[in-house]
Image (cartoon, coloured by chain):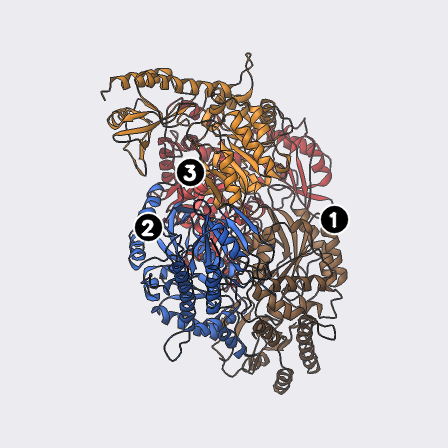
Chain colours: A orange, B red, C brown, D blue
Amino acid sequence: MNPIGAVIKVGKETRRREKVMKVKYSFMSDYSELVHPQVLSKLASIGNAQFDGYGLDGFSEVAKKLIKEKIGNPEADVHLVSGGTQANVIVLSSILRPYEAVISCDTAHIFVHETGAVEATGHKICTAKGVDGKLSVEEIDEVLKFHIDEHMVKPKVVFVSLSTEVGSVYSKEELTAISEYCRAHDLYLYLDGARLGAGLASPACELTYADIARLTDVFYIGGTKNGMLFGEAIVICNKRLQEDFRYHIKQKGGLLAKGASLGVQFMAMLEKNEAGEDLYDQLAKRAYEMAMKLAKGMKDLGYGFLSEPETNQIFPIFPVSVAEKLHECYGFYDWAKVGEGRIAVRLVTSWATPEEKVDEFLKDLSGIKQ
Amino acid sequence: MNPIGAVIKVGKETRRREKVMKVKYSFMSDYSELVHPQVLSKLASIGNAQFDGYGLDGFSEVAKKLIKEKIGNPEADVHLVSGGTQANVIVLSSILRPYEAVISCDTAHIFVHETGAVEATGHKICTAKGVDGKLSVEEIDEVLKFHIDEHMVKPKVVFVSLSTEVGSVYSKEELTAISEYCRAHDLYLYLDGARLGAGLASPACELTYADIARLTDVFYIGGTKNGMLFGEAIVICNKRLQEDFRYHIKQKGGLLAKGASLGVQFMAMLEKNEAGEDLYDQLAKRAYEMAMKLAKGMKDLGYGFLSEPETNQIFPIFPVSVAEKLHECYGFYDWAKVGEGRIAVRLVTSWATPEEKVDEFLKDLSGIKQ
Amino acid sequence: MNPIGAVIKVGKETRRREKVMKVKYSFMSDYSELVHPQVLSKLASIGNAQFDGYGLDGFSEVAKKLIKEKIGNPEADVHLVSGGTQANVIVLSSILRPYEAVISCDTAHIFVHETGAVEATGHKICTAKGVDGKLSVEEIDEVLKFHIDEHMVKPKVVFVSLSTEVGSVYSKEELTAISEYCRAHDLYLYLDGARLGAGLASPACELTYADIARLTDVFYIGGTKNGMLFGEAIVICNKRLQEDFRYHIKQKGGLLAKGASLGVQFMAMLEKNEAGEDLYDQLAKRAYEMAMKLAKGMKDLGYGFLSEPETNQIFPIFPVSVAEKLHECYGFYDWAKVGEGRIAVRLVTSWATPEEKVDEFLKDLSGIKQ
Amino acid sequence: MNPIGAVIKVGKETRRREKVMKVKYSFMSDYSELVHPQVLSKLASIGNAQFDGYGLDGFSEVAKKLIKEKIGNPEADVHLVSGGTQANVIVLSSILRPYEAVISCDTAHIFVHETGAVEATGHKICTAKGVDGKLSVEEIDEVLKFHIDEHMVKPKVVFVSLSTEVGSVYSKEELTAISEYCRAHDLYLYLDGARLGAGLASPACELTYADIARLTDVFYIGGTKNGMLFGEAIVICNKRLQEDFRYHIKQKGGLLAKGASLGVQFMAMLEKNEAGEDLYDQLAKRAYEMAMKLAKGMKDLGYGFLSEPETNQIFPIFPVSVAEKLHECYGFYDWAKVGEGRIAVRLVTSWATPEEKVDEFLKDLSGIKQ
């Protein structure tokens, strides 16, 4: 079972390569490896113990308690679901009245890469350009002021992601400003944390889990992209949004009969070791470190970046010939043409990326003549 | 982590018992135990092998091939998703135009127990009474004839489940008749196979996997209730319904980033042993046998049943005092009052039910004075 | 331009007759005649006066004021839309959260004759049998108690119609009981008043407009079936349901650019004459009187009824041969087989039914040999 | 009943003025006057003739025949509904499968001014910038190429309007190019004709009704903005899209019980006079002529325009002080700031605009010192 056909995507054109059988390593995503062994051990440890269905089991209870401790908010409501698009759809459709809308960047996952899932629940997404995948207060304000009466939708939720779809992070100041704006204008702030671990592992992001819980109304902690088989923990901080949430999960097909499979995995991720650290943060940190090592190596070789590397997604710029050569042995996405003959590509590291693969990649890169 | 609060449900009244700490065993459902060890071993065997995301991995490819072999239809399309409500919603909303509707029994899971998930995608469910949870051709015909013009919805899909929500199975003759009616009247036939293993394990059901594939337009093979962590395999036999199906999965939040987690599990369930049997059928058979042993034991003690036991869900009738006594040590649902002072209860066995627990239950039952 | 092909509908079978060119009169509906001349005169009187769009004009303002006076509730919100299905969809979808449902009779227009319009906005309708098209508190309570947890929808609105789809009316006692039940159980009560005039014109209904406004949360006053070209006035009595209602109207396509066309018509219907009576009540009364004259005449000829005639829809029972004979000269719907060789038919009178047509019908009926 | 509060809208800021009692004339819209007298006479001529309900009457039949003659396509399907947003929602939701999307300009009515009505039926709108409210083939192609796989919606319908929301018209060449592109790429072309009369009345638009019918798959002919009380005629040219369309109308609340009220009005609009001209085209022409007279007068006074006047919506640029002065006596919308101290405003003429009001406006304008 060898990886991985590389999808070649430049600007508007995309094609799927034939399976490349000799790929040394894939930097295509942080969900290319199945599951961290500790998570699997935890699942195995349950044996045939019986439990209540639909997330009302004791494991999920413990997992939720661990999450509330991690974010320092015992009053929050926590719900475990199986995927990010699912989390986004359930949360947003639970908050909005039929004519209300979401404000997001036009690079937001919900806007570009969820097959119109939010619109399929009846809601429009109003976009702003953003910078580096991030919304500013000014842009949110502009969207709000544009929508003046009942002939237009009424924006009600601001959607941000951390880290963003292009690997950047909000600073504490930026997210605080957005949060304050939302509260002053009766908007809800929802944070998509598919890569929350990756975001908070970055020194560029001075935010803590407690900050996130304090500044947002709802967010989720992504497990799939940080070493779990699957699993995202929706955290509802705003009490007004907590009522009847399980109805929404069930109606949208998100209530697993064996919800325990989520609870057990999150237990494995969040129980602290003797050093007081949990696996979730350890894995996120490791992905970050591998990305930084890659980035530094490429900088040392003289390569620049589309934007400054901040998390486990980095966007080096190569001559097209170099990128083509790398594609022979490594999986990654082409991202965007950058001037004549140059291209930005996306490399993603994960909790499972072996350091020797990073070294090998850098060595191979240094051997390619531009 | 001890089980399981018992939900007491008689007629319209339901209450959740306090956690019963001394329960000897729970017969509440077939999803009370996490996962069969062979499935877990298979997941462990993957290690850190890398794979394509979103179900395009090689494991899923193998799993789909095994499924097509099992049903004897190489032309079918197979898609793996994480839960039954999700499967139902994705399939039904993919088939129907906005004004088209589903025909089902009024005991159907989609009608009663999915929080209006089908309606939430815009479609009405037209119900018939059914007998023992099963639709007849006459009833379908009546529903069809009732809907005469554009002031009413247009029924387009017939929904059946096997085994049904009340433990019964369609005979080959019954399902064939429905299938023929559907084809003659331009209706699609969709079979909810959350408990397909349990259904086909029953001698009362003379149907094979190949029959199901031949008689229906779409169906799914349920894994969650037959020993997997989670996972249902949607099988689209009718070519007209295959187009663009992955769009529907993605939009409804059902496309797992690590789709491989489904593929690997189904591989574990469907690879045949030396005797030519797969784990899926073995586990279904075991659940059936435990139910039959329970049933026979109760019959021997003189108890009758709400309907003849056919699958792993059985509905014995007890004096209320007996049921109350049993509740002290066993988990199960009260189902329906039956005359004065008697009650039908639901007992469910699973792939994991230990034979000694069945024996213990029967022994305890025989010791209770009526 | 002569009327009217008769649709023959008995039990489940329906067919449309060829256009019957010699029909003397059609009793098929109360929307077979276009518009009362006074309404048309009022429209003509506007000339080319200019007005604000989308219902913000001065005519609509006056009309709303007249409606609030008629119902004795200056705090109500009034919105004018063009049709009944539209009113039902806008109101119900504005009230409900995604997992919430409606309770209605299984004869309710929203359940049978609106092509799944309510479900198309995502909501399930939970039905009870009812008696004579009317819900009882006991039935509502049964539906409520059946829905116990997040695996099921949560009923939130009770839908009643007055007069009902089968011509009956709620008594003051009956509607009061339902209203009190709803308030005690946090349900909203919505009354479909497509034939509100017809209902309140009936002595069998002791309710007043003020009673309706007091007992319900939302209702509408139907104009289309009482002499207007088109137009229904939604009245929102419950302040919690008033917020942002125009957004819902606009989103569902119900905000007419020339909302004034609704305002002017309702002005014509509601301005009082010297005797203190408005056209709306006069027309409703006339339809009632013609129905009663028809009913009395048929009783005098020895015919019985499916249910006691209470409003402008009546359901006499004829031998099939008599009904067939009548179909040669009169338009009406066959309704239901009643024993061997007899059939109940539906006759509807309207504001425009000429008394001589009633006389002629009775004379013709008396001349038919059974 | 005097008009009309002027809404002041500049860039993002809008406020509603106090009712201005001394307004001489409103150029705010082409739906400020109720109905042309000939249309009203036709309605009056019906008297109490009886007709079939829900658009199956003989008047509607005649109207549909007249429309098919006007567009030269006897095979088209015609349906009469009451408003433009309603038409857009019914048509688009009838065409699209759940994951399919619309391509439009970001100035399109469906994107900006219909309160998310299209999204409320579950569909995303993918926008392009456009020039003067018009899409180009290049832009459509870019949108199509951007959407590469099942993680994104699949664009399926191209939405254009004629005349556009900013008063421009497509040339025959432009619309032909779009039509050919759509057919080559399996896209449907839908044309919003709320102001189709105004568009085709413009010499800048060399298109005929027959061209529109030939080049598009569906379009509608707007009556509300061209002298009718209300009414839009949906024309379905593509046979694949004709099936079961009445179900969609009914479900979305658009099937008027007295559909005859639409049929009669369209008869009045489309019956030809001795000169072979119908009222529809006459009224559209008159609105155009008044706009051109206004435009010429303003040009003669030295004023420029935001874009060249082509239809009954024109956008002169004034110094802010001049616009303010005009607001004292005339109703119109401020549109956009144009450099320092200047503003573009929107003036709309209609079938009912008296020539002397145009003259008066120009005289008043000439008297204002800049």
Task: Tell me, yes or no, if residue B77 can be seen here.
Answer: yes
The N terminus of chain A - image quarter = top left
Q: Residue at x 48, y 60 (%)?
A: D367
Residue linked to disc 3 = A113
Residue B192 in view: no
**Residue count near mark 3 (Cα–Cα under 10 Å), binned few <14, some 14–19, many ≥20:** some
Badge 1 amino acid: Ala
In the image, residue A270 sits, relative to residue C93, either above or below, namely: above
Q: Position of residue B322 (x, y in %)?
A: 71, 37
Q: CA–CA distance between discs 3 and 2?
A: 25 Å
Residue at 65% x, 51% y: name it.
C241
Question: How many angstroms separate mark 1 from mark 3 (CA)?
Answer: 45 Å
The crowd level at tag 1 (other Cα within 10 Å; few <14, some 14-19, many 20+) is few
Give the chain letter at badge 2. D
Q: Say which residue label 1 marks.
A: C184
The amino acid type, in three-letter code, at marker 3 is His
Task: Give the chain letter at badge 3.
Answer: A
Q: Position of residue D35 (x, y in %)?
A: 51, 69
- Badge 1 element: helix
Instruction: Name the residue that disc number 2 marks.
Output: D136
Q: CA distance from mark 2 to mark 1?
A: 59 Å
* B128 or D68, nearer to the observer: D68
Query: Which secondary structure, mark 2?
Result: loop
Q: How many marks?
A: 3
Q: Chain of mark 1?
A: C
**Rendered residue at 24%/20% (across/down):** A368
Viewer-closest of B40 and A26: A26
In the image, taking residue C136 as reference, residue D64 lies left or right, namely: left
